[in-house]
Amino acid sequence: MRGRLKRVRCRDERLHATNDANSLERNSDWEATFTDSEIGSSVHEYMRSLFRFLFGRPIANEEHTTRKIGVLEGVPAMGLDALGSSSYGPEAALTVLLPLAAAGVGYLGIVMLPILILLAILQVSYRQTIRAYPTNGGGYTVSKLNLGTNAGLLAASALMIDYVLNVAVGISAGVGALVSAVPSLHSHMLLICLAILALLTVMNLRGTGDAGRAWALPTYLFIASFVLIIAIGVYRSLSTQGQHSAVMPPPQLQSSAVEAVSLWLLMKSFAAGCTAMTGVEAVSNGVGAFREPVVVRAHRTLAILCATLALLLGGIAYLVRGYGIVAMDQTQPGYQSVLSQLAGAVVGHGIFYYVAIGSALSVLCLSANTSFVDFPRVCRLVASDDYLPRVFANVGRRLVFSVGILYLAVAAGLLLIVFGGITDRLIPLFAIGAFLTFTLSQLGMVFHWHRERSRGQGRERHKHLGRLIINAIGAATTSVALLIIIAAKFAEGAWIVLIAIPCVIYLLKRIHRYYSTLEARLQDQGQLDLQHNQPPIALVAIEGWNRLADHALLFATRITSDVIALHFTELEGPDVDEHSRRLRERWTYKVEAPARAAGRRPPQLVLTRAPYRRMAEPLLQFIADLERKEPAREIAVLLPEVVKKHWWQYILHGYRVRRLHAALLSHGGSRVVVVEVPWYLEEPRPAGRM
């Protein structure tokens, strides 16, 4: 490579500023793909209408405050991961206890108790984090500011991996709940997973507020349904003194093998059950999405989520033991989730059962929405520090980070396809990233409060000391839980995540190195140098003499008096090139005579052989020779081209100009300027008149 190549578009840009929504829509990047240059105008209008129906109208920057959310939208927008995990968390813990047969159900309470304690610690810890970082209290920001860049990248990579896994696990668990109620759909699990993923992607591209309002009904219906089921189950248990009578007895465990209970087995069950807490950090990562007062709304949302999650986890653990509910193999026909068995045992398989299971299905599938809200925001922060492609920091047409949303959808879709949409196959990969982020975030807050305490005086120092102790307890407990999760899940697939995280960090650093190098080379070198400002040598590539060549040469004579028209011979093979002979005959009359009559230096015609029927090599060689002769001047290469209006025109025209353009960009060097000279068969309409 010989340096950066400057590129100039040789056409006047018609800029139209308007507040009209239709005009904004025409100028949006996405809809620019559906232009008349690609397809017919009628199809263009249809696609534009469909696009607007799916994704909504473009939103102006001035409307950003109206796109903020409150607690009502915040719970479904950011809390679905935590709420949905109340289903697959206890079920994952029960699955590990399967070797104990029916006796394993009795140990679920022992496993869930430390999980509930850890949940309470995290709730208090993240409440402090939100207060300390009201603009964004995510693990990446807290770790980077308090523990250093490497710790921030570790938290970011862990978060990004965990968010992708959360989408796959949440959707597959939701489809598992659907299959529990409708077993005939078992063979279509993967297809249903991908369809739900597409729906989530579209809704989040419309905006966080739209997604939050759309998912509000199933979210609150789920909370009401299972709180009522737990209340009924607990009431019956207390009124019958623990003698449960199931309306619909759950399926019996088929295996009669019983393994002796061990601390290791309980630790593995605890590690699996910890997946129930993976969404607790979501509110701190998405604080910027709330309306003012931000801290108050974020605190209320976090409190509602943690209280509801604790109630569901505790109630499910209590009733599972009483009704003798066991985990079943999701890959086998007749599978029923723990929630399905619990709802059937408490209220039967009537209308209420299907309402509850339907809401559970919705919440589980939509639990991936938490990742769709937070993953793009984390990517935006990382991209703002130049550790991800800067396009991740660009705001889309609906004031959301569209690139992050699309990347998340593609990555999660690939995971679902690879693992067949089965939750149990994905669970071993899950929760490591979340607990690693928990630990780094809490440890970062310890350093934050220590620094604040050293600056404070009197009572303020005591307050900061109390906050430091709370976050220290949070860091200690989550780090212990992280070690248990890694040890318990390592052989089951957790090693994949442990390898993936360093790979992601390496990639992030390579991206940052590129941007750092780019910025160093683009640094300001002082004032504009106008002393060495000779006009360039214009080099026009022409096929023959026509209006296209006339247009390009005319423009070239306006920017410089040194114009060379370059025509390639033998492009069609070794036979005599008729175009070259005719061009020579007409050049004197068509070009040289008018130039002399106008008192200007005539453009020079040069015929260059292309023995291998390719234009790039002889053109680059000609440029190299010209640079040696004129070392102090730049060379402007003009490439005239017919602008295609319809898709079929791309088939009828060759691609030599495109290939020539690419070759010049790759090998032309910093002294070569590429100028595209478009020729329109039909002049385009100004944007404001469309």
Image: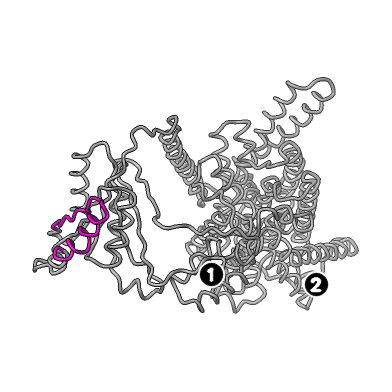
Image x and y of residue 286, in percent: 68, 48
The magenta segment = 584-609
Who is closer to the viewer here, 39 or 333?
39
Type of residue at label 2?
Val
Question: Which numbered dot is residue 347?
Answer: 2
In the image, residue 598 lies in the stretch drawn in magenta: yes
Say if mark 1 contacts mark 2, CB within 8 Å.
Answer: no
In the image, residue 675 lies in the stretch drawn in magenta: no
Quarter location, residue 255: bottom right
Who is closer to the viewer here, 332 or 523?
523
Secondary structure at badge 2 equals helix
Mark 1 or 2, closer to the camera: 1
Colour approach in the figure = one colour
Whether residue 300 is situated above or below residue 455 in the rendered picture: below
- What residue does disc 1 label? 190
- Quarter holding the N terminus? top left
Secondary structure at badge 1 equals helix
Who is closer to the viewer here, 15 or 88?
15
Q: Is 129 left or right of 45, judged from the image as shown? A: right
Quarter location, residue 192: bottom right
Whether residue 27 is situated above or below residue 438 in the rendered picture: below
Question: Which numbered dot is residue 93?
Answer: none
- Quarter holding the C terminus? bottom right
Who is closer to the viewer here, 232 or 390?
390
Confirm whether residue 487 shows in the render: no
